[in-house]
Amino acid sequence: VLTFHITPTDYLLGVADLTGELMRMCISSVGNGDIDTPFQLGGFLREIHDGFSYIGNTGPYEVSKKLHTLRQSLGKVEDACYTLRVRGSEIPKHMLADVFTSRAAAHLDPDDPMV
């Protein structure tokens, strides 16, 4: 039997790291022509963000610092959903990957370790 002892802080940091991976999954799914996944992931990331917002500055320092990165990931997913909803009918599916690649390059943040 294998057991792990994880502190609540480590668990929350792991969930925060998961949000970055979900953001990447969202953007790559758009590139693959899947336009449903970003909306599902966007709702899930909003729920995670709301949970982290309740912790806010009252939790451990590392968790409050990750909240900034989580907001950035959520913003990228919401931007992708907005683009799909508003401009999705204008952009052919095979060109969606190019649109999101160029937008992601414009949002590069040197302090963002998830890029």
Image (tube, grey):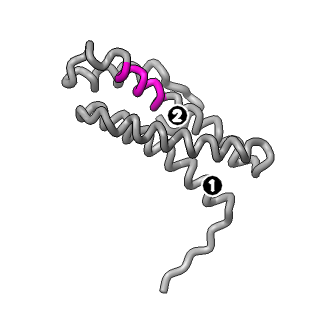
* Type of the residue with mark 2: Leu
Q: Give the range drawn in magenta.
A: 76-85
Density class for disc 1 (Cα within 10 Å; few <14, some 14-19, many ≥20) is some
Cβ atoms under marks 2 and 1 closer than 8 Å: no
Tell me which corner region of the image, top left, top right, bottom left or bottom right, holds residue 80.
top left
Q: Residue at x 75, y 47 (%)?
A: 61
Tell me which corner region of the image, top left, top right, bottom left or bottom right, holds residue 57.
top right
* Label annotation for residue 74: 2
Establish if 5 lies above or below 77.
below
Residue at the spot of label 1: 12
Establish if 12 lies above or below 36.
below
* Location of residue 38 in the rendering, given as x and y in whole percent from the top left corner: 38, 35
Q: Residue at x 37, y 41 (%)?
A: 25
Q: Going by the image, does 66 lie left or right of 31?
A: right
Report the front residue among 72 and 111: 72
Q: Which residue is drawn at 46% across and 24% down?
A: 79
* Residue 26 part of the magenta segment: no
Q: Going by the image, does 62 lie left or right of 37?
A: right
* Type of the residue with mark 1: Leu
Q: Going by the image, does 77 lie left or right of 5?
A: left
* Location of residue 22 in the rendering, given as x and y in whole percent from the top left corner: 44, 44
